[in-house]
């Protein structure tokens, strides 16, 4: 192919060669066609570091992989709210991919955390699509800056592990459009990933791998995706149906079966050759893109340092009653409790597992940052006795690898009983207690949080988790992470509680758009720590909110500029994540009280003030109207809130949005009330019904109380009620038969 153009190569390929091009040749490679100089591409997991199996590996994808930097998992990296940092991480993963000959990295994962129970939440960014999209796009941009492809996964509605291979996610279109698709949409339209990985599950009864609406109508026709859709590993059930729906590459290959089925389908006329040509052309384009990749050397020490910086930015300080940061002092006695202080857990189990280049140890890292202090260690239950001889206790607790993993979901969000008992025992000593949490997804803290002095949520922050935790505990780095998922008081408070993980092959997304904080806020439920929460060792003041509207909905050029001033009121440099939420309190559909529409992370020196500016457009005020089949911003009042978390709103204002009422399309199933609510419909109805001698509207239009009572009937159904003035002729004049 080197000397041929893509279209020449395509024209020269046989049907058999095209069919082969669209399935892999083994677990990690695409198929080479040497006659046309088409080489095989190597694809490799995963989102937060490479899992490149050696060429003599087990070829089923499960065994060990070559050493690579294990960066923070998505749950952690998302909590940094820092796309620039995530871009750097992506770039480093891209460099390692170049060094290991990898053409496409299978990540990021941007599925929404619908329930805290999802076993794979550690691989996903957030319960909110805005932040998931921004973080996912940054990772793709970083990886692809190295001429290595990204693969955004798992498209779509893969929000649980239970029965993940075949469960049907039953999701209405509005919920899909507002919650489960926007992160993909943003990444695809801005970062232009080379590939998208479809999910295993069915969406409303059809496997994602053969879902035409998803893979072609939305992904390509609406969003303009021009890359390759790759199957999740083993997600293809009907190769021909999948290809016709828009799935390009089957991985791993069902060799001898899938390729033959495609050839036969083309020969029999069941599959249009044009579909196979389109797919082959996309595979050739992928090859062209990957040919720009140059080999590289990766610097393990530099990447470890980046992994540590990223982890430190991701760690969230949930609570601090003055005990942190620890100040180095010959008099200070620090007791580290829990095995994690010696053997850190830093990643989750499953296909994303990286073989790290090195692993930090908290005991060593803290000792080197607090050289004068006395740091001791107690692994378990005896710890309370030792605590009596300490000035401060740092308890490292969390989940074990078996508690959360790809392949299955959790059944509760509690910590192991022994760990909770340990916290109670330590707190009972009266010594200041800091809890460092090591877990990939939210755990319940409500039964002990009040007893301790500080809580540091580390997530699974990669191979440098321990070093980064030491940076935070010692104050070497001022914490700036914020939660991208709510920590509920009880699992039962979560809006998906009654519909997770579904039953008998179906999971109904009954909570609709009320996912995560959208649900907790709408139901006014107390939470332990809200979405967006995270403390710093300094304080930030918010002031001077201003909102400027330009353009209009009518002209399609609405622009809203929101700005405010953030001041570092403390005496340390620190970074704040300023969050902007929008609410539409009076709408024709149920809408969440507030939805994140923008954020900015800024570093502010002590005593300094920074002006922050956000731009909103019509889509930011809109919901997906199923009746109109489009995004809709209804005229009226909108609440603009700026805050330090979804429940720490510092500035608030209300804006008025002008514009024509959207109205519903009036059809033969529109009710009398809907006709009356629509200005044009109302006028036409009045004209058709006419007035009496006194100028009063005839029939029911002159009787408002009656109209309110039976106004829910569709107009044509009222013809059988005598005396209402809604006759066959009236209906016929308004809704002529086609
Ligand atoms: C996972 C994907 C992963 C693939 C290859 C699948 O089981 O769902 O996320 O990329 O395996 O390892």
Image (cartoon, rainbow, N blue to C red):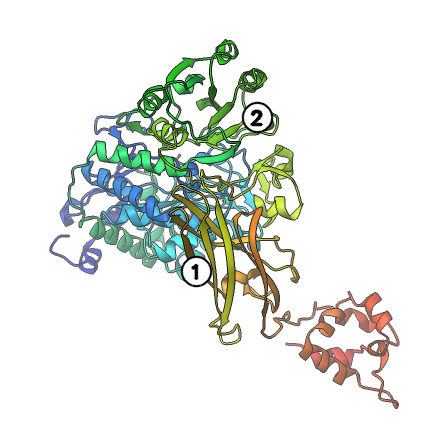
**Does the residue tagged 1 have its C-beta within 8 Å of any atom of ligand 1?**
no
In this rendered view, identify the residue nearer to me: 542 or 383.
542
Task: Give the x, y percent position of residue 63.
Answer: 31, 24
338 over 158 or under it: above or below: above
Sort mark 1 into few (<14), some (14-19) or many (20+) by Cα contacts within 10 Å: some
| SS for dot 1 | strand
Most distant residue in the left direction: 3
Q: Is residue 18 visible?
A: yes
For ligand 1, the image quadrant comes to top left
The image quadrant that residue 98 belongs to is top left
Task: Give the x, y percent position of residue 110.
Answer: 43, 44
The quarter of the picture where the C terminus appears is bottom right
Q: Which mark is residue 414?
A: 2
Q: Is residue 272 left or right of residue 631?
A: left
Most distant residue in the bottom direction: 693
Q: Which mark is residue 613?
A: 1
Task: Give the x, y percent position of residue 107.
Answer: 35, 42
In this rendered view, identify the residue nearer to me: 294 or 717.
294
Residue occupying the point 41% across, 29% down: 473
The image quadrant that residue 463 belongs to is top left
Task: Give the x, y percent position of residue 84.
Answer: 33, 48
Q: Is residue 236 visible?
A: no
| SS for dot 2 | loop
Residue occupying the point 52% across, 60% down: 545
72 over 543 or under it: above or below: above
| Mark with earlier residue (1, 2) | 2
Q: Which mark is residue 132?
A: none
């Amino acid at each position: 192919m080197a000397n041929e153009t893509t279209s020449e190569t395509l024209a020269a390929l046989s049907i058999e060669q095209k069919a082969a091009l669209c399935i892999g040749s083994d677990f990690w490679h695409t198929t080479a066609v040497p006659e046309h100089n088409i080489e095989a591409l190597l694809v490799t997991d995963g989102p937060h570091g490479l899992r490149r199996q050696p060429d003599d590996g087990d070829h089923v994808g499960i065994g060990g992989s070559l050493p690579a930097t294990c960066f923070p998992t998505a749950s952690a990296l998302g909590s940094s709210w820092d796309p620039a940092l995530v871009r750097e991480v992506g770039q480093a993963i891209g460099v390692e991919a170049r060094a290991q000959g990898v053409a496409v990295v299978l990540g990021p994962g941007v599925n929404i955390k619908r329930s805290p129970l999802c076993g794979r939440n550690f691989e996903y960014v957030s319960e909110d699509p805005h932040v998931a999209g921004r973080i996912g796009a940054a990772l793709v941009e970083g990886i692809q800056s190295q001429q290595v492809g990204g693969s955004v996964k798992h498209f779509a509605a893969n929000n649980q592990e239970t029965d993940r291979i075949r469960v049907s996610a039953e999701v209405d279109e509005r919920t899909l459009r507002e919650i489960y698709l926007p992160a993909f949409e943003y990444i695809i339209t801005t970062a232009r990933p080379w590939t998208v990985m479809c999910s295993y599950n069915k969406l409303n009864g059809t496997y994602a791998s053969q879902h035409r609406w998803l893979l072609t109508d939305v992904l390509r026709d609406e969003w303009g995706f021009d890359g390759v859709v790759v199957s999740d590993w083993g997600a293809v059930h009907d190769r021909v149906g999948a290809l016709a729906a828009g799935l390009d590459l089957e991985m791993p290959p069902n060799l001898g079966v899938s390729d033959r089925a495609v050839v036969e389908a083309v020969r029999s006329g069941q599959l249009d050759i044009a579909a196979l040509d389109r797919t082959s052309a996309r595979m050739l384009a992928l090859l062209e893109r990957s040919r720009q990749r140059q080999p590289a050397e990766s610097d393990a020490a530099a990447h470890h340092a980046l992994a540590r910086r990223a982890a430190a930015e991701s760690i969230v300080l949930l609570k601090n009653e003055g005990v942190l940061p620890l100040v180095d002092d010959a008099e200070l006695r620090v007791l580290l409790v829990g095995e994690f202080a010696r053997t850190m857990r830093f990643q989750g189990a499953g296909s994303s597992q990286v073989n790290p280049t090195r692993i930090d140890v908290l005991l060593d890292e803290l000792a080197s940052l607090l050289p004068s202090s006395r740091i001791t260690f107690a692994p378990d239950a005896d710890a309370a006795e030792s605590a009596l001889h300490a000035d401060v206790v740092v308890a490292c607790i969390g989940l074990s690898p078996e508690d959360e993993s790809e392949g299955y979901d959790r059944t509760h969000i509690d910590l192991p009983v022994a760990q909770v008992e340990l916290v109670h025992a330590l707190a009972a000593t009266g010594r200041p207690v800091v809890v460092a949490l090591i877990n990939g997804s939210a755990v319940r803290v409500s039964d002990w949080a009040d007893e301790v002095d500080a809580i540091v949520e580390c997530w699974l922050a990669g191979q440098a988790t321990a070093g980064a935790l030491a940076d935070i505990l010692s104050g070497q780095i001022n914490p700036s992470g914020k939660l991208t998922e709510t920590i509920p008081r009880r699992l039962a408070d979560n809006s998906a509680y009654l519909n997770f993980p579904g039953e008998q092959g179906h999971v109904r997304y009954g909570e609709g758009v009320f996912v995560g904080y959208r649900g907790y806020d709408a139901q006014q439920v107390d939470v332990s720590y809200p979405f967006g929460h995270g403390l710093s060792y300094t304080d930030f003041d918010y002031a001077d909110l201003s909102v400027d509207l330009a353009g209009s909905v009518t002209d399609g050029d609405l622009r809203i500029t929101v700005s405010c001033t953030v001041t570092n009121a403390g005496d340390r440099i620190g970074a704040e994540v300023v969050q902007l939420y929008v609410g539409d309190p009076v709408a024709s559909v149920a809408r969440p009280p507030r939805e994140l529409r923008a954020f900015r992370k800024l570093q502010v020196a002590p005593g300094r003030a920074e002006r922050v500016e956000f731009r909103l457009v019509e889509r930011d005020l809109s919901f997906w109207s199923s009746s109109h089949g489009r995004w809709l911003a209804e005229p009226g009042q909108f609440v603009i809130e700026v805050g330090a978390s979804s429940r720490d709103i510092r500035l608030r204002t209300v804006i008025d949005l002008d514009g024509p009422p959207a109205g519903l399309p009036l059809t033969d199933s529109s009710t009398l009330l809907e006709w009356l609510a629509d200005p044009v419909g109302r006028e036409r109805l009045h004209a058709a019904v006419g007035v009496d001698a006194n100028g009063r509207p005839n029939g029911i239009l002159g009787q408002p109380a009656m109209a309110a009572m039976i106004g829910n009937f569709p107009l044509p159904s009222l013809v059988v009620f005598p005396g209402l003035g809604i006759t066959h002729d009236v209906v016929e004049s308004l809704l002529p038969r086609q």
